[in-house]
Image (spheres, helix red, strand yellow):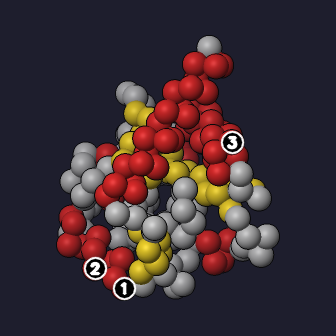
């Protein structure tokens, strides 16, 4: 079963895994901060499971390229990111039956921190409680959920299979 750990414990684990890289998302892309559970990956996009989550089943869609502003994103790349975020949201609806799904690019107002990155990324988060609010879902004050490696791998495998099946069905 996934375990709820405190924000301080999560930050300590992240530091132990990879220190404070110049860009957290680039470091995840390059497998420099512990395991990366990739749901889908191609030349432009990485879809992955963040390993510290407020809601189990959370997916992140990110461009492989290090872009930190919308000015730095072409229409074509933004269309790809959003197409994959939509694909992820549909996948979550099918597999997890959430009440709803947040699809959000929050940016980082405080530069590069351990739990937030300026490198553009879109959160796709399944919600199971009708009282869920962004202020709670996007804060670590209430702790974060983590899984054991086999739990992450099982979730990753389930998502990757569903991802491929849906792509095949659309083709
Ligand atoms: Zn980056």
Quadrant of the snapshot with the C terminus: top right
Q: Secondary structure at mark 2?
A: helix
Quadrant of res 12: bottom left
Residue 89 visible: no
The residue at which mark 1 appears reads as 8
Left or right: 149 with respect to 100?
A: left
Quadrant of the snapshot with the N terminus: bottom left
Q: Secondary structure at mark 1?
A: helix
- Residue 121 location, x and y as percent? 50, 51
- Residue 90 location, x and y as percent? 68, 40
The residue lying at 65 percent from left, 19 percent from top is 170
| Some atom of ligand 1 lies within 8 Å of the CB belonging to the residue at label 2 | no
Q: Are marks 2 and 1 in contact (CB under 8 Å)?
A: yes
Quadrant of res 126: bottom right
Residue 160 visible: yes
Q: Which mark is residue 12?
A: 2
Q: Secondary structure at mark 3?
A: helix
Q: Which mark is residue 94?
A: 3
């Amino acid at each position: 079963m996934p375990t709820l750990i405190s924000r301080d414990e999560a930050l300590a684990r992240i530091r132990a895994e990879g220190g404070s890289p110049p860009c957290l998302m680039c470091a995840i892309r390059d497998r420099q901060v512990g395991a990366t559970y990739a749901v889908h990956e191609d030349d432009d996009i990485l879809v992955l499971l963040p390993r510290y989550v407020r809601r189990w089943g959370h997916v992140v869609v990110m461009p492989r390229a290090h872009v930190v502003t919308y000015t730095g994103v072409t229409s074509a790349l933004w269309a790809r990111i959003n197409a994959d975020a939509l694909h992820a949201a549909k996948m979550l609806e099918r597999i997890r039956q959430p009440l709803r799904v947040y699809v959000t690019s929050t940016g980082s107002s405080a530069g590069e921190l351990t739990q937030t990155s300026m490198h553009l990324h879109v959160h796709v988060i399944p919600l199971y409680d009708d009282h869920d609010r962004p202020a709670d879902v996007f804060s670590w004050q209430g702790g974060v959920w983590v899984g054991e490696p086999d739990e992450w791998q099982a979730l990753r495998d389930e998502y990757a299979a569903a991802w491929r099946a849906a792509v095949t069905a659309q083709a």
